[in-house]
Image (cartoon, coloured by chain):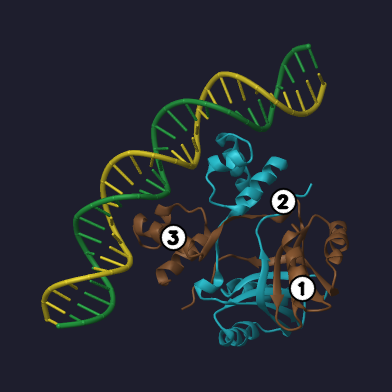
Chain colours: A brown, B cyan, C yellow, D green
Amino acid sequence: MDSKDRQIIRALQCDGRMTNQDLAEAVNLSPSPCLRRVRNLEAQGVIQGYSAVVDAKSYGLPITVFVRIKLERHGEADVKNFERKMQLIDEVLECHVLTGAMDYQLRVLVPDLEAYEEFIRNRIHPVGGIASIDTSFVYGTVKRTAVFPAAR
Amino acid sequence: MDSKDRQIIRALQCDGRMTNQDLAEAVNLSPSPCLRRVRNLEAQGVIQGYSAVVDAKSYGLPITVFVRIKLERHGEADVKNFERKMQLIDEVLECHVLTGAMDYQLRVLVPDLEAYEEFIRNRIHPVGGIASIDTSFVYGTVKRTAVFPAAR
DNA sequence: CCCCTAATTGGCAGAATCTGCCAATATTGA
DNA sequence: TCAATATTGGCAGATTCTGCCAATTAGGGG
């Protein structure tokens, strides 16, 4: 992982479908070694995959919600149960463990407010062991990039 | 935007570098119309781009932080100033406006805790007009997917 | 300072993929 | 039912990928 690898990574975060020759040109390499570096990064799991960036509204899911959840108990079983359930809920795109009061933060996508209510009632509450839920709707998005800072 | 378009989108969210023939096969089309649908989705801005999914830790940025910020005043000028500054800070990967107390939530990536302190001191405070900052460090990530729910 | 080793690079060629065009098919509305 | 329209499938030239080999560069020991 040298500076060239990081250059390659940022270029592919900007445009994941860039052709190998364009990528090579962008980072001042010839196509062969460039491709080999990319394959190495993929094999090492540094590049975990590629993904289309899609406008959720156009797709039909205009409402983004950040949900913060606190559990009643934090025993092994309770935690495992909660985390396994999160994996299975399609509306939950992200689930992070936060420091502090052993909280979770979810990023959830729904078509409308009614669907959000149903989501809480039919998907989250049935998980059980939840002490409190804090909901923040996303009113607008000022910035959203996949590109890491160049740093060091 | 029909069910086939949504199928295509989810397939490309799973693997943004899928070849057009594989994609066509996955959604039961022949390569030609499949490619045309993809190009349409791109032209309409539904597919906004493609991006490599990278392990931040391997890249050298192991600390993810969610930062919630409340402004002192919410005049046009204050808001514009804040939002423009956020665009310019490389460590800020996301900045959302949240409903409620006119708050923002940032997703920030830094190499270590010292860098986070510097980030707050040298990048956020100088923006000015900030009433309060609430920091939540990400302790672990249970789930992180780009794939939208199938829905409807 | 030089040499030796190893890693990385650059280029080439066969194979796979893309993509613009045309005819055929399916869909919609009257 | 029929006609108009949109969508589809397949083909061919152009582009891109990728495995192999020689050349170059970088690092360490004598």
Above or below — where is A98 with respect to A31?
A: below
Above or below — where is D1 with respect to B87?
A: above
| Residue A44 in the image, given as x and y percentages of width and height | 48, 65
Residue drawn at x 51%, y 76% as measured from the top left: B60
Residue B77 appears in the picture as rendered = no
Q: CA distance from mark 2 to mark 3?
A: 32 Å
**Secondary structure of residue under mark 3:** helix
What is the count of numbered marks? 3
Residue A38, labelled with which disc?
Answer: 3
Residue A58, labelled with which disc?
Answer: 2
Name the side, left or right, on which B4 lies relative to B110: right
Q: Earlier in the sequence, mark 1 or mark 3?
A: 3
Name the side, left or right, on which D1 lies relative to C1: right
Give the residue type at disc 2: Ser
Q: CA distance from mark 1 to mark 2?
A: 39 Å
Q: Earlier in the sequence, mark 2 or mark 3?
A: 3
Q: How packed is label 3: few (under 14 Cα within 10 Å), some, or many (20 or more)?
A: some
Q: Are marks 2 and 3 on the same chain?
A: yes
Q: Quadrant of residue B4?
A: top right
Residue A70 appears in the picture as rendered = yes
Residue A77, labelled with which disc?
Answer: 1
| Residue B73 in the image, given as x and y percentages of width and height | 77, 81
